[in-house]
Amino acid sequence: KEGVDFAELRDLAGLYRVWNPKYNSWSVFGQDHVAKILLGWDVEGRAHNAVEDACKSIRLFHLFNKLKDTPEWDKAQAMLLAIPPGPSFAKRYPTFEGCCMGNRRTCTCGAPFFVS
């Protein structure tokens, strides 16, 4: 429970979002893109590994705390915007272990989609 078992919840996607003037909106990146660009941690072509994901999360959290409010933070954000992310896991694998990944174009399960 927040405030009892842990101080607060931090969302890495929110910490690493970048204002994109080209689209006049926030750009949000996947963990693999942020780790590849800022940590040199490339996982392309490897099987998913939950322990590796946890380690990436911790390293990215520590990096954010080190860079925030410094000129290096601005450079990191510029790098995230400058280098296009690769295709997401859901785009690479529209169905994974029998589960539809929720892409409208490749859906195989027929589940309803939420309209925003």
Image (tube, rainbow, N blue to C red):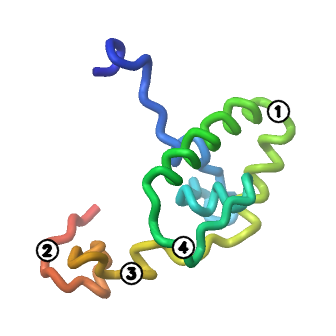
Residue placed under numbered mark 4 in the picture: 46
Q: Earlier in the sequence, mark 1 or mark 3?
A: 1
Do the CB atoms of the residues marked 3 and 2 lie less than 8 Å apart? no
Residue placed under numbered mark 2 in the picture: 111
Do the CB atoms of the residues marked 2 and 1 lie less than 8 Å apart? no
Front position among marks 4 and 3: 4
Residue placed under numbered mark 3 in the picture: 93
Do the CB atoms of the residues marked 4 and 3 lie less than 8 Å apart? no
Secondary structure found at label 2: loop
Front position among marks 1 and 4: 4
Q: Amino acid at mark 4?
A: Arg
Q: Find the distance from the CA under tag 1 to the CA under tag 3.
A: 38 Å
Q: Earlier in the sequence, mark 4 or mark 3?
A: 4
Q: Find the distance from the CA under tag 4 to the CA under tag 3.
A: 13 Å
- Residue at 62%, 70% (x, y): give it: 85
Q: Earlier in the sequence, mark 2 or mark 1?
A: 1
Q: Quadrant of the C terminus?
A: bottom left
Q: Quadrant of residue 9?
A: top left
Q: Amino acid at mark 1?
A: Thr
Residue placed under numbered mark 1 in the picture: 70
Q: Amino acid at mark 3?
A: Tyr
Q: Using a 10 Å C-alpha cutoff, classify the residue at mark 2 as few (fewer than 14 neighbours), some (14 to 19) or many (20 or more).
A: few
Q: Quadrant of residue 66?
A: top right
